[in-house]
Each structure stands twice: as C-alpha cells, then as structure tokens.
Image (cartoon, helix red, strand yellow):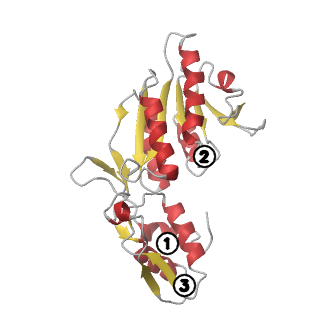
Amino acid sequence: MTSPILVTGGTGTLGHQVVSRVQEAGREVRVLSRRSRSQDGLMFATGDLATGEGLAAAVRGVGTIVHCASNRKGDAEATRNLVRAAAQEKSSQAASPHLVYISIVGIDRFPRGYYKTKLEAEGVIADSGLPWTTLRATQFYELIRNGAFRLAKLPVIPVPAGFVVQPVDSGELTARLAELALGEPRGRVPDMAGPQVLSFAAVIRMYLQATGRRPRPVVPIWTPGIGPIRAGALCPRPGTEVTLGRRSSLDFLAEKPADQPA
C-alpha cells in the first residue's frame, strides 16, 4: 500500500491543482490547513506552518510532502517547522518522507525580501538530511494577469523600463510538480518557464487587446534597484537546461476570463 502525499498550500492557485493531479494518479492526498475543515473527496490535516503546531500529526505516515504553501513574511521559518516535523517522522519509520519544494527562478540573482526568504528555505531543505526535490519556476500567468488587471484601470499605464519576464502556465507547472512528487528524489531539477520572454509593457498591451479595452499609453519608467531583473534575473539563465511550457500568454488570455483577476 502506497503512503499518502501531504500537500501544503493545497487550496492555493498551484496547490489545489497539484492535489487534483495527484488524486488523478490514484494516490491518497492529505491537505494541510490551519483550520479544521472537510470537503468531499479530500482529507485535511490541521496544522500551522508558522508555529509548528499540529505538523507532527499532519506528516505522520506520509511518503511525500509537496510544499506549495507560501508566506511573504516567513517562508523560511515555516519551512524549518515543516522540516523539523518531517525529520521527527523520519526517525519513527523505515523510509524518510520525500520533500518536494516549489521555488522561484532568479532568487539567487535577486535575493531581496520575499525572494531572499525563498532562497533561505531552499537551503533549509537541502540541508535537512531528508530526500528532496526542488523545482524553480517563473511567475504564473495568473500573477502577471492580476498585475495587468490593476494597472489597466489607469488612463496612462506606467511600467518599469526593461522589466522582462518569462511567465509559465500554472497547469503545465502543476503537471511537472505532480510528476516529481510521484517520482524519486532528484535534488535541484531544471528550472521551468514559459515559451516566451516578454517585457511587462508587452504584457500590458496584450492584456488590453485581449480584454477589448481601449488602447492607452504604456509608459516605461526608469525604476532603481531592479538592475538584475532588467538583466533577465526572472528568466532561466542562458545556456542552462530548462523545462519549457508550451502554452503562450496569448493562449492563456484567450481561454481565461481575462477581464477579472484570479
């Protein structure tokens, strides 16, 4: 009998899709939640990543932990708490839980704020003594669309000059993440990104067109402190092995309700 898979952040944009894909593969899934809840077809485990409360029970008996939960104020500490609970579980069973982590492309080239905590969390996992797999990905189309939705309300739209991204479809990303969760530990795997490198100005123009909004000026503004991003820090490094998605930004905007945020 195969062990269940625990998913943190299992109700978020990425996590709920991971849950669905793992279930489709015939595996039992346990979703970590801060509050006690129930839902047909899903098993929830109550636990708090911020404090560590309930995590020991949540990880008990699981064979894999897919860590999708994210907290802009304390991602590294939450990961420490999860690793601590998983390490305790390791000592009580024959096999250690396989920890699968979703991270962000470029956090080592732009280690500030939230990105700095993600980089720290990567180190916590790599040094945990547990079998692990880390996948870095670029921004989801949903995130890019939400930013465009807010900016599109302005009569003149300012965008950071030279800001380039290579967004990826969250569905394709979750397929890859589920594949890794169902497989053997692989350490750091090739980054995943979408098929197009785009300026944020181009994304805004595409969004305006896709939503049928009237054209308006999109003005690049010089923004200090984002030199690494202008140099492509949010895209995979040139010459490195990359897993590329196939769905383009235009495909996403055409198939989703593009006039509403995610």
Instruction: Identify residue type, mark 3.
Output: Gly
Label 3: few (<14), some (14–19) or many (≥20) C-alpha neighbours in 10 Å: few
Q: Quadrant of the N terminus?
A: top right
Estimate the spatial distance between the alpha carbons at disc 1 and disc 2, rounded to whole Å: 31 Å
Which residue is label 3 attached to? 212
Q: Is residue 231 above or below residue 32?
A: below
Label 2: few (<14), some (14–19) or many (≥20) C-alpha neighbours in 10 Å: some
Is residue 117 at least partly visible in the picture? yes
User: Which residue corresponds to the image point at 49% horizontal and 80% vertical from the top-left?
Assistant: 158
Q: Nearer the viewer, residue 79 or 258?
A: 79
CB of mark 1 within 8 Å of CB of mark 3?
Answer: no
| Residue mark closest to the camera, 1 vs 3 | 3
Q: Describe the element under mark 2 as helix, strand or loop.
A: loop
> Of the numbered discs in the image, which one, if any, rests on residue 254?
1
Pointer 1 or 2: first along the chain? 2
Q: Quadrant of the C terminus?
A: bottom right
Q: Describe the element under mark 3 as helix, strand or loop.
A: loop
Q: How many marks?
A: 3
Q: Given the current orientation, which residue lies at the most extreme front position?
A: 224
Instruction: Identify residue type, mark 1.
Output: Ala
Pointer 3 or 2: first along the chain? 2
Estimate the spatial distance between the alpha carbons at disc 3 and disc 2, rounded to whole Å: 34 Å
| Residue mark closest to the camera, 1 vs 2 | 2
Query: Picture quarter containing residue 138?
Result: bottom left
Rendered location of residue 11, percent (x, y) = 65, 46
> Of the numbered discs in the image, which one, if any, rests on residue 246?
none
User: Which residue corresponds to the image point at 62% horizontal and 49% vertical from the top-left?
Assistant: 12
Which residue is label 2 attached to? 71
Q: Describe the element under mark 1 as helix, strand or loop.
A: helix
Q: Is residue 248 above or below residue 110?
A: below
